[in-house]
Image: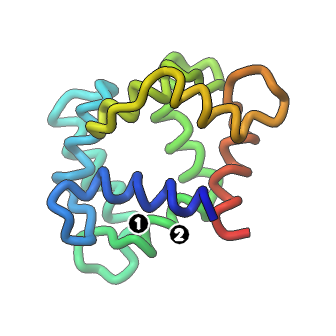
Amino acid sequence: SEVSAQLRQVFELIDADGDGKISPTELSRVLSGLGHVGAAAADEEARVMVKEIDRDGDGRVDLDEFLVAVLSGDDDLMDAFLIFDANKDGLISAKELQRVLQGVRCEASIEDCRRMIRGVDTDGDGFVNFEEFRSMMRGCFS
């Protein structure tokens, strides 16, 4: 589906060296690039996240592990949602989406971001709420 293709793109953006695995270092770079936490906190958070998601114990996250994590528990989904929702108002705006994409070195115009949001914005308010985010993420495997 289109959404699983989008998730694969997100995975590839995080996987900076293109080896098919996300290392704690690569994830840390994204977290600190988003400006949510300082470098030391990002390192620690990335280490913990990779440890939680890493099913085969190799210390890194492959695409399957990434998809399972994103699509499984609401806790993981809420964590992902909060990364996007910078002002913590419970909604993801086009501007917030653009900031995340820029944080992973993906240049998207504000219009691109509005278009992405329109694709999942079921109530038509121009924002993505948690329910819309969850159904977008779950839609990957439906």
Mark 2 or mark 1, earlier in chain? 1
Where disc 2 sits, the SS reads: helix
Tell me if mark 1 has few (under 14), some (14-19) or many (20+) residues whose alpha carbon lies within 10 angstroms of its own: many
Q: Residue at x 60, y 56 (%)?
A: 3
Q: Nearer the viewer, residue 101 or 22?
A: 101
Q: Given the image, on which type of amino acid does mark 2 rest?
A: Val
Left or right of 103 on screen, residue 121: right
Q: Which mark is residue 68?
A: 2
Extreme residue toward the right, this view? 123
- Asked which quadrant contains residue 4, the reply is bottom right
Task: For marks 2 and 1, give the CA distance.
Answer: 8 Å
Q: Residue at x 31, y 51 (%)?
A: 13
The location of residue 101, given as percent across then percent down, is 38, 35
Dot in front, 2 or 1: 2
Which residue in the structure is indicated by mark 1?
A: 53
Q: Is residue 54 above or below residue 50?
A: below
Q: Which mark is residue 17?
A: none
- Asked which quadrant contains residue 72, the reply is bottom right
Where disc 1 sits, the SS reads: helix
The location of residue 43, given as percent across then percent down, is 19, 44
Q: Residue at x 53, y 58 (%)?
A: 70
Q: Quadrant of the C terminus?
A: bottom right
Q: Given the image, on which type of amino acid does mark 1 rest?
A: Ile
Q: Quadrant of the N terminus?
A: bottom right
Total labels: the figure holds: 2
